[in-house]
C-alpha cells in the first residue's frame, strides 16, 4: 500500500493491531504458499469492518481474495452483524478490489467509525439484513 497511498491515507492494521481481541485474521494458502489474507474487525455488536485484504502479487486473479471476502461475510452473518463496511483506495491501483466489492454487493457510503473524508479513500458498506 505505501506504493499507492500516502502514509496519512493508509488505514491497514499492523501486525500488533491484527492480534487484538476485536480483530479476526485469516490467510489463504495453497501447498503452504500464502495467496492472500483478510480480517474482520468488530466495530460494535451489529457492525463489522473488513480490514487488511491483500493478495500476494504472484497470485492475483486466482480467486483467493474472493474466497477470503466471502468467508469474512459468512463469519459476519454468523456473528449477527447487520452490516459490514470497508475503506479502500481511490487510486486506479485499487480498481480491481473495488470491482470485487461491487460485485459482492458493497455500495459506496460515507466514512464510518472514526474515519474521516480523505481524497485517497473510498468507503463501502454491505447491508446484511
Image (tube, helix red, strand yellow):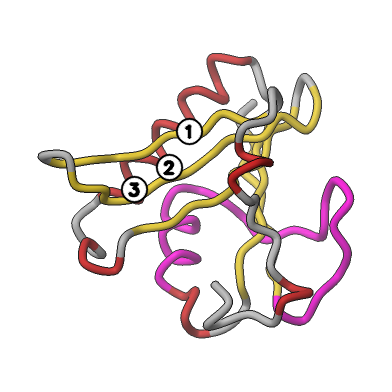
Viewer-proximal residue among 59 and 117: 59
Residue at image coords 47%, 44%: 38
Residue bounds of the magenta highlight: 96-120
Q: Secondary structure at mark 1?
A: helix
- Give the CA distance from mark 2 to mark 1: 5 Å
Q: Are marks 3 and 1 in contact (CB under 8 Å)?
A: no
- Give the CA distance from mark 3 to mark 1: 10 Å
Viewer-proximal residue among 90 and 110: 90
Residue furthest out toward the left = 31
Q: Secondary structure at mark 3?
A: helix
The magenta stretch spans residue 87: no
The location of residue 116, given as percent across then percent down, is 88, 64
Quick one: label 3, few (<14), some, or many (20+) residues within 10 Å? Answer: some
Q: Which residue is mark 2?
A: 69
Q: Is 31 left or right of 97, judged from the image as shown?
A: left
* Residue 99 drawn above or below residue 50: below
Question: If you read the primary sequence from the N terminus, does the residue marked by circle 3 or circle 1 appear first?
Answer: 3
Q: Which residue is mark 1?
A: 72
The location of residue 114, given as percent across then percent down, is 89, 50
* Quarter of the image where the C terminus is located: top right
Quick one: label 2, few (<14), some, or many (20+) residues within 10 Å? Answer: many
Rendered image: mark on residue 66? 3
Q: Are marks 2 and 1 in contact (CB under 8 Å)?
A: yes
Residue at image coords 41%, 46%: 37
- Give the CA distance from mark 3 to mark 2: 5 Å
Viewer-proximal residue among 80 and 57: 57
Amino acid at each position: 500500500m505505501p506504493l499507492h497511498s500516502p502514509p496519512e491515507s493508509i488505514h491497514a492494521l499492523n501486525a500488533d493491531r491484527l492480534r487484538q481481541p476485536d480483530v479476526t485474521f485469516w490467510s489463504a494458502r495453497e501447498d503452504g504458499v500464502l495467496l492472500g489474507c483478510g480480517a474482520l474487525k468488530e466495530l460494535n455488536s451489529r457492525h463489522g469492518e473488513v480490514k487488511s485484504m491483500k493478495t500476494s502479487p504472484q497470485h492475483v486473479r486466482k480467486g483467493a481474495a474472493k474466497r477470503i471476502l466471502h468467508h469474512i461475510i459468512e463469519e459476519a452473518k454468523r456473528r449477527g452483524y447487520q452490516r459490514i463496511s470497508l475503506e479502500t483506495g481511490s487510486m486506479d491501483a485499487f480498481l480491481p478490489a473495488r470491482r470485487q466489492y461491487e460485485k459482492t454487493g458493497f455500495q459506496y457510503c460515507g466514512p464510518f467509525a472514526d474515519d474521516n473524508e480523505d481524497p485517497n479513500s473510498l468507503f463501502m458498506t454491505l447491508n446484511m439484513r
